[in-house]
Image (cartoon, coloured by chain):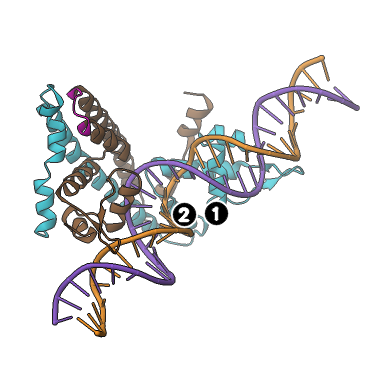
Chain colours: A cyan, B brown, C purple, D orange
DNA sequence: GCTTGAACCTCTACCTACTGTAGCTTGTAG
DNA sequence: CTACAAGCTACAGTAGGTAGAGGTTCAAGC
C-alpha cells in the first residue's frame, strides 16, 4: 500500500492535487490507516496515471471524467470515446491556429521596434493602434 | 462622455470586465454622474483598447500593467518594452510546441482506434498506457 | 521502548481573468 | 411622467489547482 507522497512522486503529481482529485470525485476515496492517512493500491496508481496523461494531452477534467465513466461502464461503443478525442483534437488545432497568428503579429511588432527612445517604440504603438479592432466592433463585423 | 455600456460595445469588452479592470487598477477611476454612474472619455477608450489588444496577443494582465507603466512614465528605454514583448513571444512559441506534440499524439491515438467495442478501444488504451510517464518519474529522468 | 522529524491530516484562502446573479437605483425616450 | 433599459454594489462561482496554518501520525534510528 502506498502513501499519498509515494503516489505523488510516482505519477509526478502534487500531493494537494491528488486530494483535490479525490474531492471532485475523479479518484475514489482510498482506504485509511488507523491514524487516518490515505493508502493507495495499484488501481489508484493506474487511474491517476491515466488522469495525468490525459491532462498532459490537454483534456479538461470534465472530458477525463467522461472517459473514466466510459471505461468504468464498458458496455458502450468506442464511437463515444472517438467523439471525445476528436472534439479534443479540434480544440487543440484551433488553439494552435490562434497562437500562430499571435506569434506572427508579435514577431512583426518586434521587427518594427526601432530600439530608440520610448516615444518611437513601435511595440507600444502597435498595441495602441487599435483602429482595426474598434472598426470590428463598431461595424459589427 | 460615454456610459460604461457604450465603452463596452466599442471595445468588445463585457461591462463587468471594465469594472474589474478598474478594481485591479488597470483603468483609472472614471468620473461619475450625480447619480453615481461612470462616464468615460477618449483617453479611457484608448487605454481599454490597448489592454484588450494586448490581451488578444496573450499578454497577462501583469505584463500589460508593466507596459502601461512604461508608457505612463515615458523617460525610459524602448529596450524594456522589447524585453516584455520578447518574453511573450517565447511563451507563445513554447505553447505552440507543446500543442503540436499533443496534436501528433491525439492523431496517432485516433488513427489506431479500432472503432469496435470499447474493450478494443485504442484511445483508452493509449491513455491508460502510462509506462513511459511512470518511468520518467521513477528514474528521475 | 522512545524520540524525532518527515510526512501526513483538515481547513481555509489564494491564484488568473473574468463571468454571473440578486436586489436596487438612475437615466432617458416617448 | 412613466416605463424600462442600463447602471450600481456586493458577492459567488468558474477551472485547475497551489500555499499555508496548525495539528497528528508513522517509521527509522538509537
Percent coordinates x, y for residue B127 in the rendering:
43, 44
Residue shown at 18% from the left, 53% from the top:
B11
Q: Is residue A30 left or right of residue B134?
A: right
Q: Is residue B58 left or right of residue C12?
A: left
- Gap between marks 2 and 1 measured at Cα: 9 Å
Percent coordinates x, y for residue A98 in the rendering:
21, 44
- The numbered mark 1 sits on a residue in which chain? A
SS label for mark 1: loop
State the mark number for residue A65: 2
Q: Is B58 drawn above or below residue D9 in the view shown? A: above
Instruction: Considering the whole magenta stretch, tell me its main secondary structure.
Output: loop
Q: How many marks?
A: 2
Residue shown at 12% from the left, 45% from the top:
A130
Residue placed most toward the observer, C21 or A82: C21
Name the residue beneath numbered marker 1: A25
Residue shown at 62% from the left, 51% from the top:
A29
Percent coordinates x, y for residue B38 in the rendering:
26, 57
Q: Give the range drawn in magenta.
A: B71-78
Can you tell which quarter of the image residue C8 is in? top right
SS label for mark 2: helix
Q: Is C7 drawn above or below residue A97 in the view shown? A: above
Residues flagged by tags 2 and 1 on a common chain:
yes
Residue placed most toward the observer, B30 or D30: B30
Residue B75 magenta? yes
Q: Is residue B31 left or right of residue A23?
A: left
Q: Do the residues labelled 2 and 1 touch (CB within 8 Å)?
A: yes
Can you tell which quarter of the image residue B85 is in? top left
Residue placed most toward the observer, C3 or B126: C3
Q: Which of marks 2 and 1 is in front?
A: 1
Figure quadrant of the N terminus of chain A: top right
Residue placed most toward the observer, A36 or A69: A36
Amino acid at each position: 500500500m502506498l502513501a499519498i507522497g509515494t503516489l505523488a512522486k510516482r505519477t509526478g503529481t502534487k500531493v494537494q492535487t491528488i486530494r483535490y482529485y479525490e474531492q471532485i470525485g475523479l479518484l475514489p476515496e482510498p482506504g485509511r490507516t488507523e491514524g487516518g492517512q490515505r493508502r493507495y493500491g495499484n488501481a489508484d496508481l493506474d487511474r491517476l496515471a491515466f488522469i495525468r496523461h490525459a491532462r498532459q494531452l490537454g483534456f479538461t477534467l470534465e472530458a477525463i471524467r467522461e472517459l473514466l465513466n466510459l471505461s468504468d461502464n464498458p458496455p458502450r461503443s468506442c464511437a463515444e470515446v472517438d467523439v471525445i478525442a476528436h472534439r479534443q483534437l479540434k480544440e487543440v488545432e484551433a488553439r494552435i491556429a490562434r497562437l500562430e497568428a499571435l506569434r506572427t503579429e508579435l514577431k512583426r511588432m518586434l521587427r518594427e521596434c526601432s530600439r530608440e527612445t520610448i516615444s518611437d517604440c513601435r511595440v507600444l504603438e502597435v498595441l495602441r493602434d487599435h483602429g482595426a479592432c474598434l472598426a470590428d466592433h463598431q461595424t459589427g463585423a
